Image (cartoon, rainbow, N blue to C red):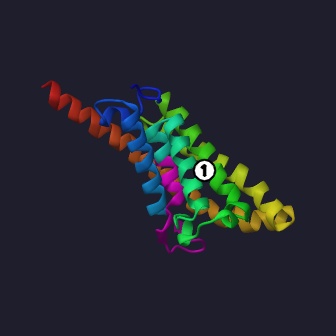
Amino acid sequence: MTSIAAPAVLADRLVARRTVVTDVALVSAGVALTALLAQVAIPLWPVPITGQTLAVLVVGASLGAVRGAASLSVYALLGVAGLPIFSEQASGLAVLAGPTGGYIVGFVLAAALTGWLAERRWDRRFLGAAIAMTAGTIVTFAIGLPWLALATGGTLEQVLAWGLVPFIPGGIVKALIAAAILPLAWKGVRALDARRDA
């Protein structure tokens, strides 16, 4: 059996043999990382930073478009099915149908986009990675904000105040953290390759 992922993303360099079994393991690891980081909060003013969206960016870029989107789709489905893996250990269809549901749907598209960009080597250097992570963050808000408006009936001004403005600092920080992690991981992979070849 062969892999479903495009070549040249970080996961493919770290896992020697690509098969459907390794794809399932990697997708599962992405679900676990997202669920774990969804429970992490850093108390910063004015908005606390949760790790959930950081996980989305890293999972997408490190697994590639197909596996990244699959991982976040499984995450959403497991949360809807009742596993307490959404932020603050929330779960159920009400979360997906509620004000934050659009962000969860946006995670799938954000992971696909960052993965697609990583397959084109945008994640190898800080600037390209920063652009890719920012694009993924924008996609999350592009889906999340209209969903928030529909779920709450809020005005444009209210929706921006509730769902965008307070999260801009955290979004920037998380995009920069992801943009630093990925090139650093690639540097480590290249160093290992050089040692093996020596």
Quarter of the view holding residue 17: top left
**Side of 192 relative to 123 (left or right):** left
Q: Is residue 48 magenta?
A: yes
Q: Secondary structure at mark 1?
A: helix
Quarter of the image with the N terminus in it:
top left
Residue at image coords 53%, 66%: 49
Quarter of the image with the C terminus in it:
top left
Question: Over which residues does the magenta segment extend?
Answer: 38-58
Residue at image coords 52%, 59%: 52
Please determine whether, in this image, residue 58 is positioned above or below residue 154: above
Q: Is residue 176 magenta?
A: no
Quarter of the view holding residue 186: top left
Q: Read off the residue under disc 1.
A: 107
Residue at image coords 85%, 61%: 156
Q: Total marks drawn? A: 1
Pick whichever, 140 or 98, lies toward us: 98
The kind of residue tagged 1 is Phe
Please determine whether, in this image, residue 32 is positioned above or below residue 132: below
